[in-house]
Image (cartoon, rainbow, N blue to C red):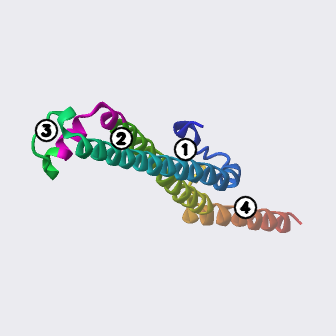
Amino acid sequence: MNYETDIVIDETALDVEWLEQPNLMMRYARVAATARMNLDLAKESLDFVRAELDKKIRTDPGIYGIEKVTETVVQNIIIAQDEYKEASRVVISAKFEADVAQGAVRAFEARKDALENLVRLHGQQYFAGPKVPRDLSWEREEKQKRLNAKIAEKTKVTRTK
């Protein structure tokens, strides 16, 4: 899947684009949902690491060089641990992926709007070639000249008889 190529609209094949739109939207909605699920799982894992570290610190604060256990001290020690840092990086990465996937879903919603507007413009013949406006006064003069020529020809025929 490639967001950049899937989002492009071929304005010469609007019917095909409309047929592909629901499938693309569903595919990217599924990617976004998976990314949100991965973010939720990463957050849950981070919470678990935090709870485990909190328990270890409170059980044996001497290992961590703590003399007096306070909430602030425990929280500061937790965020300094490598386990927590790694779990936090996973959450940040998962959040990035979820944001990108959600952005793709919004882009496909915008693509739908663009398709609707292109179809509307097509219906108004926006993409038709240029038309030369009719010059009704010239057409009338030409018609009158042809009529006068016919009349002159008929009167010429009747004079010669």
Q: Which residue in the protein does label 3 denote? A: 66
Residue 92: which numbered mark, if any? 2
| Residue type, numbered disc 4 | Ala
Q: Which residue is mark 1?
A: 7
- Kindly identify the amino acid type of the residue bearing the numbered disc 1: Ile
For disc 4, the marked residue is 149
Look at 40% across and 38% down and name the residue there.
Answer: 90
> What residue lies at 72% left-to-right and 61% top-to-bottom?
149
Whole-angstrom CA distance, mark 4 to mark 2, is 87 Å
Q: Earlier in the sequence, mark 4 or mark 2?
A: 2
Q: Is residue 76 left or right of residue 119?
A: left
Viewer-nearest of labels 3 and 2?
3
Residue span colored magenta: 74-86
Residue farthest left in this picture: 68
Residue 23, position in %: x, y? 67, 52
Q: Secondary structure at mark 4?
A: helix
Residue 80 as seen in the image, left or right of residue 109? left
Residue located 49% across and 55% down the image: 110
- Residue 8 sits in quarter: top right
Label 4 – label 1 distance at C-alpha: 63 Å
Q: Earlier in the sequence, mark 3 or mark 2?
A: 3
**Going 34% across and 34% down the picture, which residue do you hit?**
83
Q: CA distance from mark 1 to mark 3?
A: 55 Å
Mark 4 surroundings: few (<14), some (14-19) or many (≥20) residues within 10 A: few
Q: Secondary structure at mark 3?
A: loop
- Mark 1 / mark 2, whichever is N-terminal: 1
Q: Nearer the viewer, mark 4 or mark 1?
A: 1
Sequence-wise, the earlier of marks 1 and 3 is 1
